[in-house]
């Protein structure tokens, strides 16, 4: 192989892909088959996610490469803000459970009043 062909072979991408797959399998095993307490499972999966994020940044997104600007850091900052907004909105929605019946019984009361009005006519 010539020097030019060695640089074109994406060894970093292959290593990053294999590491990402292994970390995903490890996280799935931890969540589904381990005997650890739930809190430790959550901590382990979050730690594996952070490790995988760094692998993605360095192996795929070329965060260490220098360009003419510092655009990768700006993009990472904006991506982090967007992800934080999405996660916060998801947690808010799941926590307060916006459902159709709202739990106040107003639908049942309204239905009973309509039935009584129909019966009187």
Image (spheres, rainbow, N blue to C red):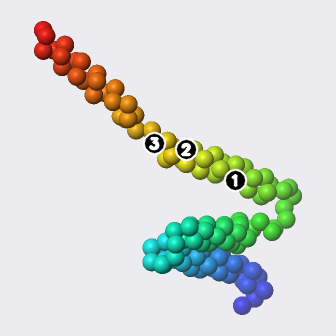
- Secondary structure beneath disc 2? helix
Residue at (59% x, 80% y) in the render: 18
Left or right: residue 63 compared with residue 38: right
Q: Residues within 10 Å of mark 2 (few under 14, many from 20)?
A: few
Q: Residues within 10 Å of mark 1 (few under 14, many from 20)?
A: few
Give the vertical position of 81 relative to 29 (above or below): above
Alpha-carbon distance for marks 1 and 2? 18 Å
Alpha-carbon distance for marks 3 and 1? 25 Å
The residue most toward the right is 68
Check disc 1 and report the residue beneath it.
80
Check disc 2 and report the residue beneath it.
92
Q: Earlier in the sequence, mark 3 or mark 1?
A: 1
Residue at (28% x, 24% y) in the render: 109
Q: Earlier in the sequence, mark 1 or mark 2?
A: 1
Q: Quadrant of the N terminus?
A: bottom right
- In the drawing, what numbered circle is on residue 55? none
Labels 3, 1: front one: 3
* Figure disc tally: 3
Residue at (55% x, 44% y) in the render: 92
Q: Is residue 114 visible?
A: yes
Labels 1, 2: front one: 2
Labels 3 and 1 touching (C-beta < 8 A): no
Labels 2 and 3 touching (C-beta < 8 A): no
Check disc 3 and report the residue beneath it.
97
- Secondary structure beneath disc 1? helix
Alpha-carbon distance for marks 2 and 3? 8 Å
Q: Residues within 10 Å of mark 3 (few under 14, many from 20)?
A: few
């Amino acid at each position: 192989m010539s020097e030019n062909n060695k640089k074109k072979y994406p060894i970093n991408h292959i290593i990053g892909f294999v590491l990402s797959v292994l970390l995903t399998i490890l996280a799935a095993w931890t969540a589904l088959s381990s005997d650890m307490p739930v809190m430790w499972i959550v901590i382990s999966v979050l730690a594996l996610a952070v490790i995988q994020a760094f692998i993605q940044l360095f192996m795929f997104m070329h965060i260490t490469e220098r360009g003419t600007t510092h655009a990768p850091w700006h993009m990472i900052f904006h991506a982090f803000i967007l992800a934080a907004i999405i996660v916060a909105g998801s947690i808010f929605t799941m926590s307060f459970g916006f459902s159709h019946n709202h739990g106040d019984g107003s639908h049942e009361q309204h239905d009973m009043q309509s039935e009584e009005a129909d019966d009187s006519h």
